């Protein structure tokens, strides 16, 4: 899954693809690099980010979605807002990627009324404050329980299980230690029985490990993607599609040889 952030303030690429033309070119580049899915977002969720209203979020992503929704790969829209979900579904989105796991009022209904896939992600707190004091007794079992509850809520609202993907939400209300435990034990999230998506690309946890700025975390991001796929992730959300594909091709070739 290749990331297209149509935002002025995203963590690693804020402002680079804020203009529709630049975002569309970015989407085309990621498809050419081999992305199987695009993830289009109009609101940064980096720690401390300020929220934007639905009208502004749609103003950012609407023109880009129109340009790419008829393209060769399905498009996910990264949003927490039911209003944006509905407009995106109407404009051809194939997946709702919600870091808030469809907890906003009306979000479950918006997803249920469509035939889109949904990604339900775990987050402790909300983006503005989530990194202030993340706290868990047992991060892996708490994240798994939350995701199991959100799968049940989605199914009860009419979102069939075959449409659901889950994500432990690396960096969303988690310390480095929490993130590492989740990655180490990612198979436990896969035991929920739906595909697992992992978003580790360029994240702060990789900066904490390597001491590198967001734009210099390619090698660390590839290592993290590979570790996630080895532990059962079916989709990896990345900014650097070509490089990640090459690394995964090596992994797949070795795996096929055994
Ligand atoms: N991470 C980000 C945004 N959306 N969605 C899912 N399912 N999983 C993730 O881990 C995830 C996500 C944050 O990353 P980025 O797009 O680099 O930054 P920003 O939120 O600042 O745009």
Image (cartoon, rainbow, N blue to C red):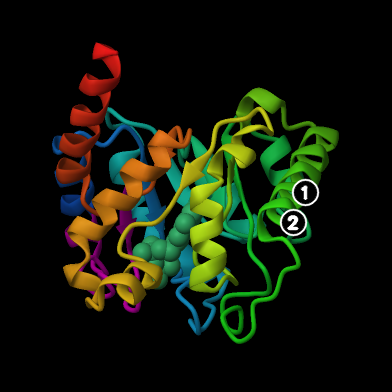
Instruction: Give the residue at x 73% y 32%.
Output: 159
Tally the marks: 2
Q: Is the CB atom of the residue marked by disc 1 within 8 angstroms of ligand 1's nearest atom?
A: no
User: Is 173 situated left or right of 50 in this image?
Assistant: right
C-beta proximity under 8 Å, tags 1 and 2? yes
The answer to whether 144 is drawn above or below residue 161 in the figure is below
The answer to whether 121 is drawn above or below residue 209 in the figure is above
Residue 232, horizontal then vertical, whole percent: 48, 33
**Can you see residue 81?**
yes
Residue named by callout 2: 142
What secondary structure is the stretch in magenta mostly built from? Answer: loop
Instruction: Give the residue at x 21% y 20%.
Output: 253
Q: Residues within 10 Å of mark 2 (few under 14, many from 20)?
A: few
Residue 93's tag is none
Residue 145's tag is 1
Front residue of 189/209: it is: 209
User: Is 166 situated left or right of 239 in this image?
Assistant: right
Q: Secondary structure at mark 1?
A: helix
Is residue 16 inside the magenta stretch? yes
Residue 162, horizontal then vertical, whole percent: 64, 23
- What is the span of residues highlighted in magenta in the rendered image? 1-23
Q: Secondary structure at mark 2?
A: helix
Instruction: Give the residue at x 38% y 73%.
Output: 204
């Amino acid at each position: 899954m290749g990331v297209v952030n149509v935002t002025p303030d995203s963590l690693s690429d804020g402002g680079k693809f804020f203009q529709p033309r630049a975002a569309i070119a970015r989407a085309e580049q990621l498809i050419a690099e081999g992305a199987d899915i695009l993830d289009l977002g109009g609101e940064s969720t980096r720690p401390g980010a300020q929220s934007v209203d639905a009208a502004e979020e749609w103003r950012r992503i609407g023109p880009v979605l129109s340009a790419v929704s008829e393209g060769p790969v399905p498009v996910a829209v990264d949003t927490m807002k039911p209003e944006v979900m509905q407009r995106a579904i109407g404009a051809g989105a194939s997946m709702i990627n919600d870091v808030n796991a469809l907890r906003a009022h009306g979000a479950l209904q918006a997803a249920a009324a469509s035939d889109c896939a949904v990604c339900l992600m775990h987050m402790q707190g909300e983006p503005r404050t989530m990194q202030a004091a993340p706290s868990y007794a047992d991060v892996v079992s708490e994240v798994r329980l939350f995701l199991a509850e959100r799968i049940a809520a989605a199914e009860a609202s009419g979102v069939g299980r075959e449409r659901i993907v889950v994500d432990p939400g690396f960096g969303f209300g988690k310390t480095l230690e929490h993130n590492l435990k989740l990655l180490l034990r990612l198979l436990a999230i896969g035991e929920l029985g739906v595909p697992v998506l992992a978003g580790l690309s360029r994240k702060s946890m990789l900066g904490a490990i390597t001491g590198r700025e967001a734009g210099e975390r390619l090698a660390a991001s590839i290592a993290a993607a590979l570790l996630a796929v080895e532990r059962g992730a079916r989709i990896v959300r990345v900014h650097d599609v070509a490089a990640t594909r090459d690394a995964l091709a090596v992994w797949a070739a070795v795996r096929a040889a055994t």
